[in-house]
Every structure is written in structure tokens, then in C-alpha cells.
């Protein structure tokens, strides 16, 4: 340490301001209520000991920053922000809405007054909708068409006011962060969709473009539901490479809808878009799984494919993804298609068409034939690895003893002759110029600028 810093350090300790600590109260501060906290004296020790976590340190609701990694290694994720966890830790068992922070309580009063205004506006909009529905369309200028336009506009405004009435409520936000939100309520569906579109939606759109899902599989694909893929309780990010022994078992899905349609029936299709065809020197598609008539709703998002065994649902059983040695990665797409009119499709007809004819599958033809609409998508990739041969042997799949090698295609064009200044000056006439262009090494020694070593 320099001399100046050694001299200034004691002065800075004395000039450090003391902080006042007092309990929560709406009245003015009194001198008897405050305590002073002296600045900590820095000491130097030769040995350091690691802090031992207490039960509060390993609670996901109160874990501090230094023990977050320890908790995540145990398989539990921290809940909420660090500021929120610290507030719960320091206030004990006090209810969240009664936290003793003056700014927090005053803000809740302002939010309560704003909510009353939004609720009053919502009640007026609902009354307008009821009055317009009871009104005869013949008395409205524009007839039934204009009546329906006005009703759609009023319902849209009522939905907006419903969201604004609760979007700033700290209790609503806390329940949503804790994963305890009721997805039957519009506010929680709105927050979930906003969170999904902030990252996961952009990621899946990037994967659709990056891996050419459009137009290789479908001419158009716009996801409106969140589809998450799990193998052995592990979440698979879209586009990740999954080992063959892991993808041998059926995955689980989470299909989260955000609209207010309630329960609907969907069909899940898994396709391999990169099956090599040696005869045609190209790639084809293969169907790996089809399950129909699966109920999904905003409050019912879990889809356990291993439990889908009924004849009215399971159309094509699971075929483990497998890649031939030497072939590039295979794109395994998981497509969720909504059934038209919430009507059940004939699983027996699907089974008769595709159970024995998996190769050459066309999702576009399947969609048009059964009146389905793609609403969700996720994907993973499969490559040849150490377990692929064993997986293929267990399921009786051919091709484990093959290896594909790229075939070099030679150009049929004639060799291009040299052109330009260099080609023109290659004759012996210009050989004396080589010392300026071909034998340059460091600085020239023609005039003795450098010494020989």
C-alpha cells in the first residue's frame, strides 16, 4: 500500500456516516427509536472458513445469494427475486400483504384506488354489452353485421379492463412468480403468455427458421401454444441433441394454451425429417409417433405420452429415433395440431394408413386429410452415438452395420487459365523482378541495413 493511502485510510473510517435503523411506523422518527451501527473493522486472518447453511438458507423462498448454487445442485430452484426472498426472510411468518414497509403499504393504497376505477369501468362495459345483446338488430344502423362488430369491440375492451384491474396487484404477481397462478383466470393467462413471448416464442421461431422446418415440413407454421419437451424428467431445449438411449423412451409434453376456449382436443405427431435415401441420393421423412384426441386446456397442460395407450388415442406407437452412421443430424419435430371443431378424429383410420407405412410421411397431407391446424411445435436432434447400435438391435431396426460416406463430385468444367497481371508477367522476360515480389524476407539487406547472423 502506498504512503498516501495508508495515511488517508483512518480518516475515511472516521468520516463514514452512521446509518439509523428503526422499526416500521407511519409517524415521525424519534431519537429513542434509533440505533447506530458502527462501521465494521476490517481484520486480516490467515485462515478462512466456509459458512454453514442453516434451514432458512436452503429454503427456496428465503435462500440468499451465496447459497443459490447449493440449492440448485440439490435440484430445487429459488423462488422469486432476491429482494423478495430477503423481505420474506427478515419478516418471518408475516403475511405478504402486511409487510412492514411504509412505501409498500402506501403503494398498495394507490393500487387499490386504481383498481376500483378499473372495476367501475369494467362494470359499465359489461352493462353496455348486455344492453346491446338485448337490442334488436333491425333498430341498429348496419343491421346484424354492425351489431356483431360493436359487440366484438366492447368484449375486447372488457377483456382489457379485466387485465388492467389486476395486473399491478403484488399478490397476483407473487402467485404467478411462485407458479401458483390459476390459469382459468385471464390475468394469469396474460402474464404467462407475456413471459412466453418474451423469450421462448422467439427461440422456437428462430429454430423453425434455422432448421428450415418451413418449408421442408409445412409451408407455414405459427406457434400459439407453448410446447415443452421432457425426457426422463429433464427439460429438452428446442434443437438440443438427445442421446439414443434417452430418446428410446417416450417423452412427456407440457402444452400450455393461453386463450379462453377452454378444453380442446389435439393430435401429437413426431416426425424425422432427415431419413437418408441411398437410392435417390436424398432425404425423406418418417413418422415416429401419432396420438390423437388428447384433451388440453389452460389449466390442464401436462400430456403424459407414456400413459396414452387407448385404442381411441394411440394411432402409431413410438419408434425410437435412430441415425445411420455417417449421416448428418436428424431433425425430430414434435407437432401439436388442434382438431377442428373440437371433434374427435378416427384413430383407427390413422392407424390403418400410417402404422405399417411410416416412411414417406407428409404432415401437410395428414393435416389436410383429417382437418387439423398446427398450433405448437418443439424439436430435438438425434445423431449416431455409442448407444445407437444397441437401441437398434433391441427394437429390430436395420442399418446398424451401415456407414454412409460422402461422395465427392468432381467438376466437369475445364480448368481456368491464369489471368491478370501475374499471369502476364510469368515469362523469362520479367524474371529479374522476382527479387521484388517472391524472395522478400524481412527488411532488404541490399544496402547493409541488417546484419547477418
Image (cartoon, helix red, strand yellow):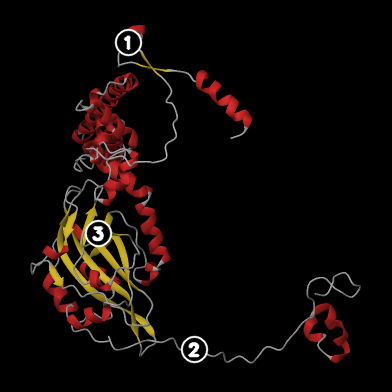
Report how far apart the C-alphas of labels 2 and 1 lie in the structure. Answer: 85 Å
Label 2 sits on a secondary structure element that is loop
Q: CA distance from mark 3 to mark 2?
A: 41 Å
Local crowd at mark 3 within 10 Å, few (<14), some, or many (≥20)?
few
Q: Are marks 1 and 3 in contact (CB under 8 Å)?
A: no
Q: Position of residue 197 (x, y in %)?
A: 35, 49
Q: Which residue is mark 3?
A: 234
Label drawn at residue 104: none
* Quadrant for the C terminus in the image: bottom right
Quarter of the image with the N terminus is top right
Mark 2 touching mark 1, by CB under 8 A?
Answer: no
Q: Is the C-beta separation of discs 3 and 2 under 8 Å?
A: no
Q: Is residue 390 above or below residue 209?
A: below
For residue 17, side relative to residue 342 (left or right): right
Helix, strand or loop under label 1: helix
Q: Position of residue 235 (x, y in %)?
A: 27, 58
Q: If you read the primary sequence from the N terminus, does the residue marked by circle 1 or circle 3 appear first? A: 1
Q: Earlier in the sequence, mark 2 or mark 1?
A: 1
Please identify, in this view, whether the residue under mark 1 or under mark 3 is nearer the observer.
Answer: 1
Nearer to the camera, 182 or 174: 174
Along the line of sight, the residue nearer the viewer: 380 or 149: 380
The residue wearing badge 1 is 33
Badge 1 density bin: few <14, some 14–19, many ≥20, Cα 10 Å: few
Count neighbours of disc 2 (C-alpha within 10 A) and say few if under 14, some if 14 to 19, many if 20 or more: few
Q: Earlier in the sequence, mark 3 or mark 2?
A: 3
| Residue at image mark 2 | 408
Residue located 25% across and 34% down the image: 172
Amino acid at each position: 500500500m502506498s504512503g498516501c493511502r495508508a495515511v488517508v485510510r483512518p480518516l475515511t473510517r472516521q468520516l463514514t456516516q452512521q446509518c439509523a435503523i428503526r422499526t416500521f411506523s407511519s409517524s415521525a422518527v424519534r431519537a429513542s427509536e434509533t440505533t447506530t451501527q458502527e462501521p465494521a473493522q476490517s481484520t486480516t486472518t490467515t485462515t478462512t472458513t466456509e459458512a454453514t447453511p442453516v434451514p432458512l438458507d436452503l429454503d427456496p423462498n428465503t435462500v440468499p445469494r451465496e447459497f443459490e448454487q447449493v440449492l440448485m445442485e440439490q435440484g430445487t430452484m429459488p423462488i422469486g427475486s432476491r429482494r423478495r426472498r430477503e423481505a420474506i426472510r427478515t419478516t418471518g411468518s408475516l403475511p405478504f400483504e402486511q409487510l412492514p414497509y411504509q412505501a409498500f403499504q402506501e403503494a398498495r393504497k394507490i393500487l387499490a384506488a386504481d383498481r376500483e376505477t378499473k372495476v367501475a369501468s369494467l362494470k359499465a362495459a359489461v352493462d353496455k354489452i348486455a344492453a346491446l345483446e338485448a337490442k334488436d338488430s333491425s333498430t341498429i344502423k348496419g343491421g346484424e353485421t354492425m351489431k356483431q362488430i360493436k359487440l366484438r369491440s366492447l368484449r375486447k375492451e372488457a377483456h382489457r379492463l379485466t387485465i388492467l384491474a389486476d395486473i399491478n396487484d403484488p399478490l397476483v404477481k407473487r402467485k404467478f412468480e411462485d407458479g401458483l397462478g390459476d390459469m382459468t383466470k385471464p390475468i394469469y393467462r396474460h402474464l404467462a403468455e407475456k413471459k412466453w413471448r418474451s423469450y421462448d416464442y422467439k427461440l422456437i421461431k428462430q429454430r423453425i427458421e434455422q432448421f428450415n422446418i418451413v418449408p421442408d415440413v409445412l409451408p407455414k407454421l405459427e406457434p400459439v401454444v407453448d410446447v415443452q419437451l421432457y425426457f426422463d424428467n429433464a427439460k429438452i431445449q428446442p434443437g438440443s441433441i438427445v442421446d439414443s438411449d434417452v430418446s428410446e423412451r417416450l417423452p412427456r409434453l407440457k402444452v400450455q394454451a393461453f386463450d379462453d376456449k377452454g378444453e380442446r382436443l389435439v393430435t401429437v405427431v413426431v416426425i424425422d425429417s432427415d431419413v437418408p435415401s441411398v437410392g435417390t441420393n436424398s432425404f425423406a421423412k418418417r413418422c415416429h409417433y401419432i396420438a390423437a384426441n388428447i384433451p388440453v386446456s389452460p389449466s390442464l397442460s401436462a400430456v403424459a405420452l407414456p400413459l396414452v395407450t387407448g385404442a381411441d388415442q394411440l394411432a402409431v406407437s413410438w419408434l425410437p429415433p435412430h441415425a445411420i452412421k455417417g449421416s448428418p443430424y436428424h431433425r425430430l419435430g414434435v407437432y401439436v395440431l388442434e382438431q377442428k371443431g373440437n371433434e374427435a378424429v378416427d384413430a383407427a383410420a390413422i392407424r390403418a394408413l400410417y402404422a405399417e407405412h411410416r416412411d414417406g410421411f407428409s404432415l401437410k397431407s395428414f393435416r389436410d386429410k383429417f382437418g387439423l391446424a398446427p398450433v405448437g411445435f418443439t424439436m430435438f436432434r438425434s445423431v449416431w452415438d455409442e448407444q445407437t447400435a444397441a437401441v437398434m438391435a433391441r427394437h429390430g431396426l436395420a442399418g446398424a452395420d451401415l456407414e454412409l460416406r460422402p461422395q465427392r463430385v468432381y467438376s466437369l468444367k475445364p480448368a481456368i487459365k491464369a489471368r491478370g497481371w501475374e499471369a502476364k508477367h510469368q515469362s523469362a522476360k520479367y524474371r529479374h523482378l522476382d527479387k521484388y515480389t517472391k524472395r522478400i524476407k524481412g527488411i532488404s539487406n541490399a544496402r547493409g541495413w541488417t546484419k547477418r547472423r
